[in-house]
Image (cartoon, rainbow, N blue to C red):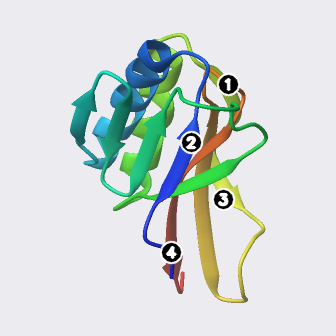
């Protein structure tokens, strides 16, 4: 299992705003706010080096309401939609995959997902 993900971004301030706005509904706080590095739980973000692009990062949501809140917070802040909340046809039989997607300022696909088993 991985320990953390590190994204390199073009604009640290824009990324700080995006991630703070969309991760708050998921209960993921900003733990480190340094001049060149941000830390949100297992996500590190810096502006040092080549920009990460076409990355897909999925965050676990406690329930469907948290997925909805993640997506709504992103849209309310003017961020780009990449998939409205809904059930996806992913995962093994018997699993319900409820997810929503937003694009971060660098075009990375950021997902909130709640998975459950049974009806």
Residue for point 48% across, 23% down:
15
Is tag 3's residue or tag 2's residue first in the polypeptide sequence? Answer: 2
Q: Is mark 1 in CB contact (under 8 Å) with mark 3?
A: no
Local SS, label 2: strand
Give left or right: position of 90 versus 44. right
Whether residue 84 is visible:
no
Residue for point 46% across, 37% down:
45
Distance CA(mark 4)–CA(mark 1): 23 Å
Mark 2, Cα crowd under 10 Å, few <14 / some 14-19 / many 20+, is: many
Distance CA(mark 4)–CA(mark 2): 14 Å
Mark 4, Cα crowd under 10 Å, few <14 / some 14-19 / many 20+, is: few
Distance CA(mark 4)–CA(mark 3): 26 Å
In front: 102, or 117?
102
| Spot occupied by residue 115 in the image (x, y as percentages of width and height) | 52, 72
Mark 1, Cα crowd under 10 Å, few <14 / some 14-19 / many 20+, is: some
Q: Give the numbered dot on residue 106.
A: 1
Q: Which residue is mark 4?
A: 2
Residue 100 in which image quadrant: top right
Distance CA(mark 3)–CA(mark 2): 27 Å
Q: Which residue is mark 2?
A: 7
Nearest to the eye among marks 4 and 3: give it. Answer: 4
Is tag 1's residue or tag 2's residue first in the polypeptide sequence? Answer: 2
């Amino acid at each position: 299992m991985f320990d953390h993900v590190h994204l390199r971004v073009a604009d640290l301030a824009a990324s700080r705003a995006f991630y703070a706005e969309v991760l708050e509904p998921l209960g993921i706080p900003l733990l480190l706010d340094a001049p060149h590095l941000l830390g949100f739980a297992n996500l590190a973000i810096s502006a040092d080096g080549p920009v990460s692009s076409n990355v897909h990062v999925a965050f676990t949501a406690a329930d469907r309401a948290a997925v909805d809140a993640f997506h709504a917070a992103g849209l309310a802040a003017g961020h780009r939609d990449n998939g409205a909340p809904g059930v996806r046809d992913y995962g093994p039989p018997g699993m319900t995959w409820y997810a929503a997607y937003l694009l971060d300022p660098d075009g990375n696909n950021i997902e909130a997902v709640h998975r459950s088993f049974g009806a």
